[in-house]
Amino acid sequence: MIIIISNPSPLAYEHEIIRHLFNEGLEIFHLRKKEFSENTMRSFIENIPEPHLKKIVLHSHHHLVKEYGLRGVHESQKFRGEMQGGTISVSFHSFEELQKFGIKYDYCFLSPIFDSISKEGYKSGFNPDEVKVFLKDRKEKVIALGGIDEHKVETVKEIGFSGIALLGAIWQDKYPVDKYIRIKERWLK
């Protein structure tokens, strides 16, 4: 499973890039735009072709999921709302959090697995060997987030994650779609 998280702020040609990512097989796109008003979020969603709406997970304005037929919501740990249909995901930053709450979600992010690409100074606090042992008998789908690019895909697979979430590797690359294709090829190997 490969998930791409939107760039936090708007980018030039963003919708065109997102369309190309979907056309290259992207199955889950997390729309995380904290500063977007509801109307701005609606406008953003309405610029995505209808067949791809069911691949979008919202990080805010969760009530729009049902209205637009989106995939689901990503909750903050503080928000424990109820969803009528759709997936629910959450982010964790420690083994303890994941053990306590993880089973309640369709999948969860564990981060930062490696030093972040998009957040300067956001360092990993995880030891790959410890993560591998921790994940060995987990029933949850745990997605690696933080510092993942094409050079770390094999390591993430060896550790035992169910998937990867990408942000900085995609949006800070001059050719984000090509970058996604390279990462996807390595993930599917």
Image (cartoon, rainbow, N blue to C red):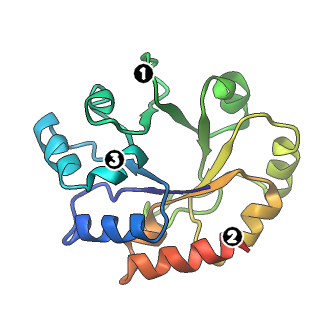
CA–CA distance in space, label 1 to label 3? 23 Å
Residue 101 as seen in the image, left or right of residue 45: right
CA–CA distance in space, label 3 to label 2? 24 Å
Amino acid carrying mark 2 in the image: Leu
Residue name at image x 21 percent, y 72 percent: 13
- Say which residue label 2 marks: 188
Q: Secondary structure at mark 1?
A: loop
Residue 103 as seen in the image, left or right of residue 175: right
Q: Quadrant of residue 72?
A: top left
Amino acid carrying mark 1 in the image: Phe
- Say which residue label 1 marks: 79
Q: Nearer the viewer, residue 50 or 108?
A: 50
Amino acid carrying mark 3 in the image: Leu
Query: Where 19 sits versus 92, above or below?
Result: below
Residue name at image x 72 percent, y 35 percent: 140
Is residue 116 visible in this depiction of the protein?
Answer: yes
Residue 174 in picture, x, y percent from top left? 36, 83
Mark 3 burial class by Cα count in 10 Å: few <14, some 14-19, many 20+: some
- Say which residue label 3 marks: 53
